[in-house]
Amino acid sequence: MTQKLSFSSLGVSLIALGIAIGGQQAQASTLFNNRTAFQNDLNTFIIDDYENPNYFKGDIVDSTNIDIHTNASMSSVVGQTKYKTTTPFGSNGYNIIFSPQLGNHAYCAGCNGSFLLDFTQTTVGNALGVFGAGFDIIFGTQYFAHVTFGDNSTEDFSLAGQTFWGITSEKSIKGVHVGLIGGDSTTSGSIVIDNLTIGGKSIPEPASVMGILALGAFGATSLSKRKQQQNTIVKA
């Protein structure tokens, strides 16, 4: 009897352990300050370097050195990220594309404002968001990335002193608000980003967890068959 109880408890415990491990992994997220390492964690990704010619046709301002877009115009150029400036410069958005250095173009919101990047409508994700998001920081101050995950939980990450910031999460990333802690907006300081990168990755059930679950199920099944065989012998 003692041996039978031990096998049964082992099977239940292993199954519980497998569920616990799976739950912990489902909540895992990883931060990156290196672009190469970040991109290596993705199966597929899209980089927006802000060099698409349609960025140089701002619907608010269209000039040689600077273009300013409404949220709708900015979001429609590549169609992979929804932009929303969270500054008082204009209710329809104030997204700026300009060339801060070496002829390459970059993005800012008023160049002294905050903005939201929404990743729920892309070809490398789904309605819950993307697996990874990151960008180069051309220059910036003490801003934060307020991340909203696929389960609607949120977390703040400091961008101070970084030239690249990226994150991957098995919970998916719905959006990133660049501004203050808690997703609050600001017009203090400035931040400019480039090479916005979003990516996807298939996340199969870890083999180790499947092995644990299989072992637990096997133990419980073996115990059940052994008990049936013993009952048959007793009845005979």
Image (cartoon, rainbow, N blue to C red):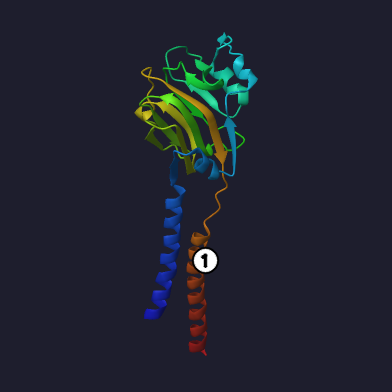
> Who's the residue at 38% across and 36% down the image?
155
**Residue type at the position of mark 1:** Ala
- Expressed as whole percent of the image width and height from the top left, the position of residue 208 reads 50, 61
> Who's the residue at 51% across and 64% down the image?
211
Q: In this view, does 96 lie to the left or right of 187?
A: right
- In the image, residue 216 above or below residue 74: below
- In the image, residue 194 above or below residue 98: below
Image quarter (top left, top right, bottom left or bottom right) of the N terminus: bottom left
* Residue at mark 1: 214
- In the image, residue 22 above or below residue 112: below
> Which residue is most to the front?
102
Q: Quadrant of residue 42?
A: top right
- Expressed as whole percent of the image width and height from the top left, the position of residue 82 reads 54, 26
Q: Of residues 147 and 163, which is closer to you in this image?
A: 163
- Expressed as whole percent of the image width and height from the top left, the position of residue 132 reads 51, 39
Q: Quadrant of residue 67?
A: top right
The mark total stands at 1
> Who's the residue at 54% across and 38% down the image?
130
Circle 1 SS class: helix
> Who's the residue at 51% across and 17% down the image?
95
Q: Quadrant of residue 147?
A: top left
Label 1: few (<14), some (14–19) or many (≥20) C-alpha neighbours in 10 Å: some
- Expressed as whole percent of the image width and height from the top left, the position of residue 148 reads 44, 34
